Image: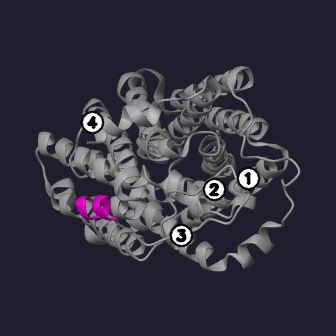
Amino acid sequence: MIGAMIPDSLRGWSRSQRHAVIASYLGWTLDAFDFFLLVFVIVDVAKEFGASVEAVTWAVTLTLALRPVGALIFGRLADRYGRRPVLMIDVLAYSILGFITAFSPNLVVFIIIRALFGIAMGGEWGVGASLTMESIPAKSRGLVSGILQAGYPTGYLLAAIVYGLLYEHIGWRGMFMVGIVPALLVLYIRQFVHESPGWRREHAGASRIGEILRRHWAITVYAVLFMMCMAFFSHGTQDLYPTFLKVDRGLDPRTIGAIAVVYNLGGILGGIVFGAWSQKIGRRNALIIGAVGALAVLPFWTMAHNVVILAAAAFLMQFTAHGCWGVVPAHLNEISPPEARGTFPGFVYQLGNLLASGNATIQAGLAASLGGYAPALMIVAAGAGIGVALLSFFGREAKEIDMTMASEPQSSRE
């Protein structure tokens, strides 16, 4: 059924629509790549600077906490000046900050650079998603939503490959130097990507974001809580999983890298499958199915000791968790106020990340008190999955909204 839906979703695209999707996918992929380089070397950074793992996780916490700042800054610029030029500036910013992380002389500077990286990282998703969703046919939104969000596990996958193949030769600093590569994407965007047809210069920036959020306070509160649970869902199952494999299971870098490749392939596939499926069954239903599926996998994901079982469970965990995430770009853009679509989806997304930004520190603290990372990961992932399922059940559906028109989104219960 899903296989038959995919070709239909891809029919009738123009060249500019294809380039918009490719650019946004690569932008989020490479953004995630620069972010996830850190999760593989937390222990090494701690040793380098004579600090605890929990202290280094503050770099992850501040990266997530400052993403709303980037979403607000770059989102408002995108609403005022257009999606395309702001996307180029944002990609260049996070690439440079990822690169200079390699030259940190101490932990304080390291954390400051990663915090600034969080601002740049926070701007990419909202701008790229609005550029794409405003450019493609409505029938393609589910599939493209899954493709776009699959960029996140793809970035994690690339980081895992770099870690597995290059870490022993270039060390943790060399891994961050590789983070300059995404800057090349700017050349592609400049050459091939057109401005979103849904962006209108005469309306851009017409309303202040505070006024828009007050006018749409109910959907704002809902979206922030929903994205908080989604952020705990993803970061709670990803950020310290390599640390769990290294510390609790004693695995070597090559094995950890191989398992990370496996579970990120699951995330990529899950995002695309659930995104396409949501076009048929609705965004809310797809989210609920993905969250419940992840809960069923939890015991195998953390309690197994056999490497094959760990890899298989990790694949299924990311297939379901990122299956939920594959629905998010379409869902958030569809329920957003149209006059601030460049700002609203990314801003509420990153506010949710702010509320969940302490995930790595929380899990590290739980691991210290509970005697291992396995129970810490399970507690957070279970709570997040339940939250996603409940909020999706009571949420709104706006699957058929016309995003090229400046009208209020209409919602319905399915």
Whole-angstrom CA distance, mark 4 to mark 3, is 38 Å
In the picture, measured across the screen, residue 312 lies left or right of residue 195, that is left
Label 4 amino acid? Val
Give the magenta range.
Answer: 288-293
Q: Are marks 1 and 2 in contact (CB under 8 Å)?
A: yes
Q: Quadrant of residue 251?
A: top left
Whole-angstrom CA distance, mark 2 to mark 3, is 20 Å
Marked residue nearer the N-terminal end (1 or 2): 1
Q: Secondary structure at mark 4?
A: helix
Q: Are marks 3 and 1 in contact (CB under 8 Å)?
A: no
Residue that carries the numbered disc 3 in the rendered image: 411
Total labels: the figure holds: 4
Residue that carries the numbered disc 4 in the rendered image: 262
Counting from the top left corner in percent of width and height, residue 40 is at 41, 41
Marked residue nearer the N-terminal end (4 or 2): 4
Residue that carries the numbered disc 2 in the rendered image: 346
Whole-angstrom CA distance, mark 1 to mark 4, is 34 Å
Residue that carries the numbered disc 1 in the rendered image: 75
Question: Closer to the camera: disc 4 or disc 3?
Answer: 3
Q: Nearer the viewer, residue 165 or 311?
A: 311
User: Around disc 3, counting alpha carbons within 10 Å, would you say few (fewer than 14), some (14 to 19), or many (20 or more)?
Assistant: some
Marked residue nearer the N-terminal end (4 or 3): 4
Question: Closer to the camera: disc 3 or disc 1?
Answer: 3
Whole-angstrom CA distance, mark 4 to mark 2, is 29 Å
Question: Closer to the camera: disc 4 or disc 2?
Answer: 2
